[in-house]
Amino acid sequence: MSLSTSPSATLNSSFASKHASSWQPGATSAAKQLKPFATEDIKILLLENVNKTGQEVLEAQGYQVDCLKTSLPEDELIQRIRDVHVIGIRSKTQLTARVLREAKNLIVIGCFCIGTNQVDTQYAAKHGIAVFNSPFSNSRSVAELVIAEVIVLARQLGDRSNELHQGRWNKVSSGCWEIRGKTLGKVSDICLHNISLLTSSAGIIGYGHIGSQLSVLAEAMGMTVMFYDAVNLMALGTAKQVPTLDHLLQGADFVTCHVPELPETSNMIGHDQIGQMKNGSYLINASRGSVINIPALIDAMRSGKLAGAALDVYPAEPGGNGDYFTNDLNFWAEDLRSLKNIILTPHIGGSTEEAQSAIGIEVSEALVRYVNEGATLGAVNLPEVNLRSLTMDEPDHVRVIYIHHNIPGVLRKVNEILGDHNVDKQMTDSRGDVAYLMADISDVNAPKIKDLYQHLEELSSRIMTRVLY
C-alpha cells in the first residue's frame, strides 16, 4: 500500500482558498489532520545540502528526514532510495529510470531548483511519482548575477582584477563602456568592430521569471531592452518583443539566454547565430549548458567577433567542488579558460542565501501538501488536481487518490467501486497517458477503507493508489 502520513499536518488555508474551486470563503471549520491508513512513517532523503529552511518544514511534520551534503554515485543512490517515500535533490543528482526503478516506495520527488532535466519525469509520471520544483524563487538572484556580468564585461573588470592579483598595474579605458546611454567607437584595436552611436541595448532570449526580472533591472540602468520568446508575452516597462531570434541577435549589444533545456534549445546559439550578432557584442548564458555551442563561442572570442562572454552553466559539470574543470570534463575547457574578458562561474546563478532559503520553503511546502493532502498543484509531470481540505466536522471521511493509465472505461470502473459509498467531492484530470483522480468519501470505517483500497488496487488501469484519512 502506498503510504501517506501527516503526524502534525496543518492546512495552508490561504493556498486552499486561492486554488480550490470548491472552497467556501465563509467556512470556519478547522482543517482535519490527515494520518496514514497504515502506521509506517514517511521517510525522506535530502541530498546536495538542501537549505535548512526546507529541512525544518519537513521535520515539523514528524517525517523521518535524512540529509546529506553531497550528491551520490548512481549505485549508492540506488541503495539509499529503495526505502524512501520522498527524495529531495538539487541539480547534480541524476534520477534516471534505472534509479527510479529501484525506488519501490517513492511517491514524490522535490527538485530544490528551477530545472527538472536531471529527473526522468516521464518515467516518474508513468509510475505515479509526482515531481515538484521551484520555478521562480531564485529568479532575482540569477537576474542580479546577469546584471553584474553585463557591467563587469563592459568594463573588463575580470581581466583588470586578475592582472592586479598577479602584480600588474594596467589602467586602461580602451574598450570599456558604460551600459547607460551610448556605445562609442571601437572596443579594441585588435578587433574588427564597427559600432556606431547606438543606444546600448540588452537582448533577452526567454522572457519568463528570470528574463522579465532582468528586463526591469536593465531598463532601470538606462538600457534599451528587447526580448524574444516562443510565445507572445506582455512586456514590462518599455521592453519590446521581437518576432524572431534573428531580430534580437542583430539588434542587441548584450545577448543573454534564459531558456529551459529542450531539444529545441540544444545548440540554440552556434556559429551561424553568433555570426548574426553585432561586432563587439557580448554573450551571456545562465540557463542551461547545452544552449550555447562552446567551440563556436571560443572561435568568436578569438576572432574578435565578440568582445566578451559570461558562462554560468556548461554541457558537463563536476559532481562536486574541486579541480575538475579541465579537458577531461569538457574537451574545450582549457581553451575557454585561456580567453580574455570571459567570466566563468560554477553554476551559482541561484546560489544566494535568500534564494536557497525561499526554494527550501517553497519545495518543502509543495511536498507536504502532496504527501498529506494529495494536491498536485505545481507538479511538472502530473495533472494539477486539488480539493479543499477535509475539516474536523468530517471525522469519518477518507481521501482516495487513484493514479491510473488514461484509457477508456477507467472512470466507469472506478465509480462502480466508489458508488457503494457517499462521495462528497471528486475531481479528475489527465496529462498525456496518465490520469489523476481524487475523491473524498464520507461515513467509512477501517474495514470499509481497506476494502475500498483493495478493489482499486485490483483494477488493471492502476498506477498507484493512495488513501488518506
Image (tube, helix red, strand yellow):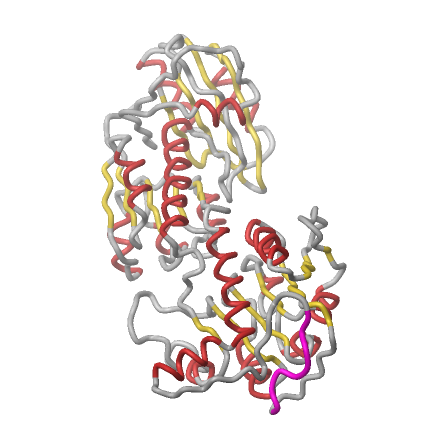
Q: Quadrant of residue 262?
A: bottom right
Describe residue 469's horizontal placement relative to residue 152 as left or right.
left
Q: Residue 446 versus residue 392: which sits nearer the camera?
A: 392
Where residue 50 sits in the image (x, y, percent)?
32, 49
Q: What x and y, as percent, mark residue 237? A: 68, 49
Does the image show residue 201? yes
Q: Main secondary structure of the magenta part?
A: loop
Q: Is residue 466 above or below residue 234?
A: above
Q: Is residue 460 visible?
A: no
Q: Quadrant of residue 247?
A: bottom right
- In this rendered view, identify the residue nearer to me: 80 or 295: 295
Q: Position of residue 17 (x, y in %)?
A: 51, 22
The quadrant of the image that shows the C terminus is: top left
Q: Residue at x 72, y 49 (%)?
A: 232
Query: Where residue 126 sits in the image (x, y, percent)?
Result: 47, 44
Which residue in the rendered view is the most extreme toward the bottom?
Answer: 190
Residue located at (37% from left, 80% from top)? 326
The quarter in which the N terminus is drawn is top left
Relative to 427, say whether 377 is above or below.
Answer: below
Residue 97 left/right relative to 43:
right
Q: Nearer the viewer, residue 207 or 42?
A: 207
Magenta range = 182-189
| Count of marks placed on residues | 0
Q: Residue 420: within the magenta? A: no
